[in-house]
Amino acid sequence: MAEKKTVKECCGGSNWNQNASAGGGAVYGFGLIGALVYYIGNASTFVEGLVGILKSIVWPAMLVYQFLKQFGL
């Protein structure tokens, strides 16, 4: 009977899925930079600039929240 191989053995070790989320990181990175430019560019005070930095970090969560709110999910 043929011996079964594990996923690690079959696909070349434990890092076979190491780069699977590289595209998502790039999208988040570009979104972060764009949000920083937008929020800081529109800030008229130092405090608004700080709030803009925080908003630019959590923009995906705000986007998903507004999407779910819009569609009533």
Image (cartoon, rainbow, N blue to C red):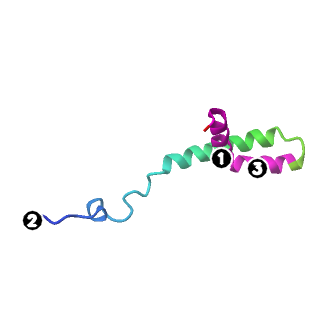
Q: Nearer the viewer, residue 28 or 62?
A: 62
Q: Secondary structure at mark 2?
A: loop
Q: For the residues marked 2 and 3, what is the alpha-carbon distance in whole angstroms?
A: 60 Å
In-image side of 6 versus 71 (left or right): left
In the image, which is nearer the foreground, mark 2 or mark 3? Answer: 2
Answer with the quarter of the image where residue 7 lies: bottom left
Task: Give the main secondary structure, helix, strand or loop, of the magenta stretch.
Answer: helix
Judging by the rendered image, the residue that carries numbered circle 2 is: 1
**Residue receiving disc 3:** 53
Q: Residues within 10 Å of mark 1 (few under 14, many from 20)?
A: few
Q: Nearer the viewer, mark 1 or mark 3?
A: 1
Of pointers 2 and 1, the one earlier in the residue sequence: 2
Q: What's drawn in magenta, residue-wise?
A: 48-72
Q: Which residue in the structure is indicated by mark 1?
A: 61
Q: Disc 2 marks which amino acid?
A: Met
Compared to 36, does 17 lie above or below? below
Could you say where residue 57 lies in the image, as x and y percent from the top left? Answer: 69, 50
Q: Is residue 11 left or right of residue 57?
A: left
Q: Residue at x 65, y 40 (%)?
A: 63
Looking at the rendered image, the quarter that the C terminus falls into is top right
Residue 38 in the figure: left or right of residue 23:
right
Q: Position of residue 26 (x, y in %)?
A: 55, 46
